[in-house]
């Protein structure tokens, strides 16, 4: 007895319903390859490595990222594969130059912005030289110099944080999109200290500059220069000029 047209239609509907309700095997295998939750160290194709939390195959949560090219380490919070939340960024202290016996034993300063380091930390750039590929030459905690500790958003310094500069200056205060912005305190290596308002890396607004000898200026600033009402207070002379 041949099946009726009604039976064929019913069979087609049953197969279509099964395809919708049952997850295909290829999709199940693909989902198993996605990293979510805590994960062991993952080695990237460019030599970097990451140890921490994942979500839908993206770095998300707490983790530590080792950047081989710049010999840097970020330890803190991630969101959608980017530095977001609280984190500490450190660079390896390079060896002193040895090309000349008379060369001073000074630490080499690598002029690379944090934005560049953060963007290349996601492993989207070409392979690094093989001479740095050995795990024995990777970053060690005892060789690190802390560069920044504080808030991050979208791979940029954002919120409250402390920056340790190459020249020895230290800034502790507010950041916005990678720039000093808001209230902050900058301590200079010569002993002077500025505490006040900042805007796009410049002293801007109300602020106090205390010199190393104890003298100070209190007043307004504009584009990193004294501008507007203010007064000088001389400690040794016990005088004040407005």
Image (cartoon, grey):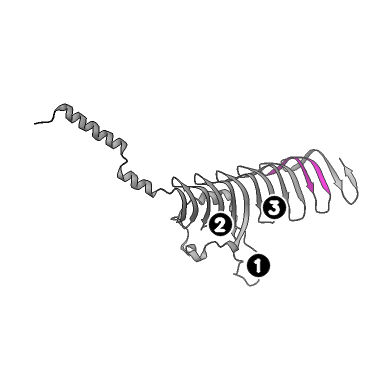
| Left or right: 189 as drawn, with respect to 55 | right
- Marker disc for residue 170: 3
Residue 106 vertical placement versus 85 (above, below): below
Q: Residue at x 75, y 47 (%)?
A: 194
Q: Position of residue 198 (x, y in %)?
A: 70, 42
- Whether 84 is drawn above or below 8: the answer is below
Most common SS among magenta residues:
strand
Q: Nearer the viewer, mark 3 or mark 1?
A: 3
Question: Can I make out residue 186 in this image?
Answer: yes
- Residue 167 location in percent, x, y? 68, 56
Q: Secondary structure at mark 1?
A: loop
**In the rendered view, does 15 fall on the left or right side of 82?**
left
Circle number at residue 105: 1
Residue 233 lies in the magenta-colored region: no
The CA span between labels 3 and 2 is: 19 Å
Circles 3 and 2: CB atoms closer than 8 Å: no
The crowd level at tag 1 (other Cα within 10 Å; few <14, some 14-19, many 20+) is few
In x, y percent, where is residue 130? 46, 63
Q: Earlier in the sequence, mark 2 or mark 1?
A: 2
Q: Which residues are magenta?
A: 201-221
**Label 3 to label 1: alpha-carbon separation:** 23 Å
Circle 2 — which element?
A: strand
Q: Are marks 3 and 1 in contact (CB under 8 Å)?
A: no
> Which mark lies nearer to you, 2 or 1?
2
Q: Which mark is residue 72?
A: 2
Residue found farthest to the bottom: 101
Local crowd size for mark 3, using a 10 Å CA cut-off: few (<14), some (14–19), many (≥20): some
């Amino acid at each position: 007895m041949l099946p009726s047209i009604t039976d064929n239609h019913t069979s087609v509907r049953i197969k279509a319903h099964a395809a919708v309700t049952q997850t295909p095997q290829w999709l199940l295998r693909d989902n198993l390859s996605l990293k979510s939750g805590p994960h062991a160290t993952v080695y990237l194709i460019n030599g970097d490595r990451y140890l921490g939390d994942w979500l839908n195959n993206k770095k998300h949560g707490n983790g530590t990222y080792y950047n081989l090219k710049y010999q840097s380490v970020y330890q803190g919070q991630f969101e959608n594969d980017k530095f977001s939340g609280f984190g500490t960024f450190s660079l390896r202290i390079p060896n002193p130059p040895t090309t000349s016996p008379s060369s001073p034993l000074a630490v080499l300063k690598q002029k690379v912005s944090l934005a560049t380091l953060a963007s290349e930390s996601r492993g989207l750039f070409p392979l690094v030289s093989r001479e740095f590929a050995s795990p024995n030459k990777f970053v060690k905690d005892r060789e690190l110099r802390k560069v920044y500790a504080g808030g991050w958003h979208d791979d940029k310094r954002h919120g409250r944080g402390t920056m340790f500069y190459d020249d020895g200056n230290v800034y502790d205060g507010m950041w916005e999109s990678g720039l000093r912005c808001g209230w902050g305190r900058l301590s200079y290596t010569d002993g002077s200290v500025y505490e006040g308002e900042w805007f796009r890396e410049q002293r801007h607004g109300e602020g106090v500059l205390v010199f190393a000898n104890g003298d100070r200026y209190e007043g307004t600033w504009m584009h990193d220069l004294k501008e507007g009402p203010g007064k000088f207070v001389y400690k040794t002379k016990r005088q004040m000029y407005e």
